[in-house]
Image (tube, coloured by chain):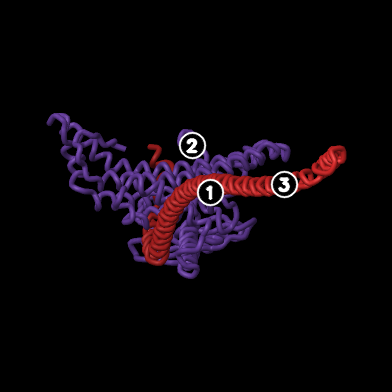
Chain colours: A purple, B red
Amino acid sequence: MVAVFSLFICFYSNASFSQDHEPNHGTGAQNEAKHGEEGDFDVTGFILDHVRDHHSWHLWGHTSIPLPVIIKTDKGFETFSSAKLSNEHHEPVIYNGNYPYKLVEGKIRIMNADGTVDEEASKKVFDISITKNVVSLFLTVILLILIFTSVANAYKKRGVKSAPKGFQSFIEPIILFVRDEVAKPYLGHQYARYMPFLLTIFFFIWINNLLGLVPFFPGGANLSGNIAFTLALALFTFVIVNVNGKKDYWKHIFWMPGLPTLMKIFLMPIELLGVFIKPISLTIRLFANITAGHILVMSLISLIFIFKSVAASAMAVPFTVFISVIELLVGFLQAFIFAMLSALYIGMAIEEHHDHHEDIPVI
Amino acid sequence: MLLEINPLVLPDPGLLIWSTLAFLILLFVLGKFAWKPIMKAIGEREKGINEAIASAEKIKAEMAQLQSDNEKLLVQAREERAQILNEAKAIKDKIIAEAKEQAKTEAAKIMAETQQAIENQKMAAVVDLKNQVGNLVIEVSEKVLRRELLNKAQQETYIKELANDIKLN
């Protein structure tokens, strides 16, 4: 998956550099004319458009839900509807707030009077808008709270001794799976303390992975394939690991016991780097896997439009279904891996070493 | 630089802030209202199940113990029965033997008494017969002695007659 993704990144970054930067200097009409010449369909643009975040939630055709834009510039906070950033044809237009804003590649930029992007001023724009991903984020938070408080109530109502029923019986084995396969093997007897974090992170990632696979409204946002989201989660793991790290953990980083002094000095920067590489690897693993899945599915669907033939769907649709089913598995697997690696990192940090000859892997 | 070009791998600070906030809220709410009661309930149930299994094992062991006790008792009872049967048989044989013995001696006694009685009767009969014969001899002798004096021939016929009479008796 990662390999496929990195190929896509290379492919995309080259293609986007040549294609998608051009419209900045041209008008919409020229842009459309150019696309018309190339064959009506811009695959990389289409896929990137799906994978990235949006300031409005597109439902169907020309219908989309406008979302609130919250930006901070040197003139303070400013809030307005994203409907003001596009016209009835869904083309970006300039909105004159504190500055003249316009959406360029999905990002809010400050425009110059002559219609070009003011790069200097744009850097000052701090965008904390409620974007499509943020709405999806809130939806999943509400969904998870509803699901798990109802499950918790089921335990209270039905009593402890009775067998789980309904949704409770679907959730319970997964909770037990997280406890027995993720927490206990890596955290030992201290597992109970980290169970809330591991369960929350597992279900949070999983439900977002699943919602990302749903192509229409409540789903469709590529949240767990967004690097800011995965970075936020990895930061939690990073903080928990380093706040709970015992003396042995820091000792193994800065002064590896049982090695010659020269080797200790040599290992120190490597181990220190490992502290940061761990959360980075968590961030990129989840982001890359989920984004790669989305790109794969969209690419297969795009085949129909590339070949400009309905007959292509005979091949593209079964493949899409096949990949989507695999993505269901990947969605679960990545949530599990994220939780498992978090547990592993925490376990390594809180472990009391008795044998000073054992080695800690860097990543 | 790849990182500068591609917006995909550039973390958006807005989303980063919202994600952190959302996750904190989720962690707090779920930790307080979901994971705590759920984990507690699951833990309690597992404890209950373990206890139930342990008590079931205990009962099973007790049952096995009881069964082996029963079997032991059964074997013992069987042995006792056999013993009692053997004893009864021995007693029976003994009683039969004793009875046989007793009957034999009783029979022998009766036979001896009977024989004695027969002997006695026989002796009485013989004595009686001797007396009768003696009487008869005396009678005959008397008659003969009387007739002899009268007639010799007649005497002889008379004696023959008498003899015939005796035979008939």
Image position, residue B45 (x, y; %): 43, 60
Q: Looking at this view, is A347 or A61 the one in front? A: A347
Same chain for the residues at labels 2 and 1, yes or no? no
Mark nearer the viewer, 2 or 1: 1
Helix, strand or loop status at disc 1: helix
Helix, strand or loop status at disc 2: loop
Mark nearer the viewer, 3 or 1: 3
Q: Amino acid at mark 3?
A: Ile
Please state if B104 lies on the left or on the right of A340 as rendered: right
Q: Which mark is residue A352?
A: none
Q: Which mark is residue B95?
A: 1
Closer to the chain start, of discs 3 and 1, is 1
Mark nearer the viewer, 3 or 2: 3
Q: Looking at this view, is B33 or A129 the one in front? A: B33
Image position, residue A278 (x, y; %): 32, 42
Alpha carbon of mark 2 to alpha carbon of mark 1: how far? 102 Å
Q: Looking at this view, is A108 or A28 the one in front? A: A108
Please state if B17 lies on the left or on the right of A358 as rendered: right
Please report, as a chain letter, where disc 1 is located: B
Q: Quick one: quadrant of the C terminus of chain A?
A: top left
Q: Amino acid at mark 2?
A: Met
Alpha carbon of mark 3 to alpha carbon of mark 2: how far? 162 Å
Helix, strand or loop status at disc 3: helix
Q: Residues within 10 Å of mark 2 (few under 14, many from 20)?
A: some
Q: Amino acid at mark 1?
A: Ile
Residue beneath the point at 37% across and 44% down: A341
Residue under pointer 3: B138
Residue under pointer 2: A1
Image position, residue A319 (x, y; %): 63, 38
